[in-house]
Image (tube, rainbow, N blue to C red):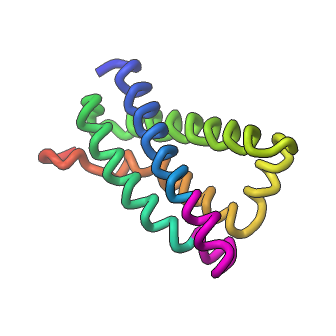
Amino acid sequence: MNGLGLFKAALASALAVFAFGFVFGTIRIFLLIPHIGPLAAVSVELPFMLAISVLVWRWALRRFDIPADMTKRLIAGLSAFIVLMALEFGLSWMMSEAGPERFISEIINPAGLLGLAGQIAFALLPLIVGTGQGKA
């Protein structure tokens, strides 16, 4: 396993979770927020996103043969977090003419902070998630 494997695992995980997040985010925005508000909507969405994140990381760690070395797994998680945040920032910028200001304003409210906590948990999952094959 080399650095390229870590990057591939991080990129694949971030892209997969971003795609699921796009789908769940659309449901959250159009179906949940109008009825229960932003914080409750994120609270409903977050457990599903974390469960998907566990499955995605299990697959990526196994697929790209990432060893149970905590340093390597931390690098993979932090790299995936950077990619995920870049994708989130890009989407926010595309969806609004406000640019970075909108992205920041959405993160510093309670619903945004809860979502950010979920994204940080996503980044830390490689440290605790096994690959589903023996010890990880």
Using the rendered image of the protein, determine whether residue 81 is visible from the camera's viewpoint.
yes
Residue 50 appears at what percent x and percent y?
43, 59
- Residue 58, placed above or below residue 12: below
Magenta range? 26-42
Looking at the picture, does residue 47 appear above or below residue 19? below
For the point 37% across and 40% down, the residue is 70
Q: Is residue 97 magenta?
A: no
Q: What residue is drawn where x is 73% and y is 56%?
A: 107
Taking depth in this image into account, of 116 and 27 the one nearest to the observer is 27
Residue beneath the point at 35% across and 53% down: 54
In the shown orientation, is residue 35 left or right of residue 7? right
Compare residues 98 and 104 and report the one nearer the observer.
98
Residue 28 in magenta? yes
Q: Quadrant of the N terminus?
A: top left
Q: Quadrant of the C terminus?
A: top left
Q: Is residue 113 above or below residue 131?
A: below
Q: How many marks?
A: 0
Q: Position of residue 95 (x, y in %)?
A: 74, 44
Counting from the top left corner in percent of width and height, residue 103 is at 77, 48
Dividing the picture into quadrants, the one containing residue 59 is: top left
Q: Residue furthest front?
A: 30
Q: Residue at x 44, y 33 (%)?
A: 10
Residue found farthest to the bottom: 36
- How far across and how far down the image is residue 86, in percent? 64, 36
User: In this view of the protein, can residue 74 be seen by the observer?
Assistant: no
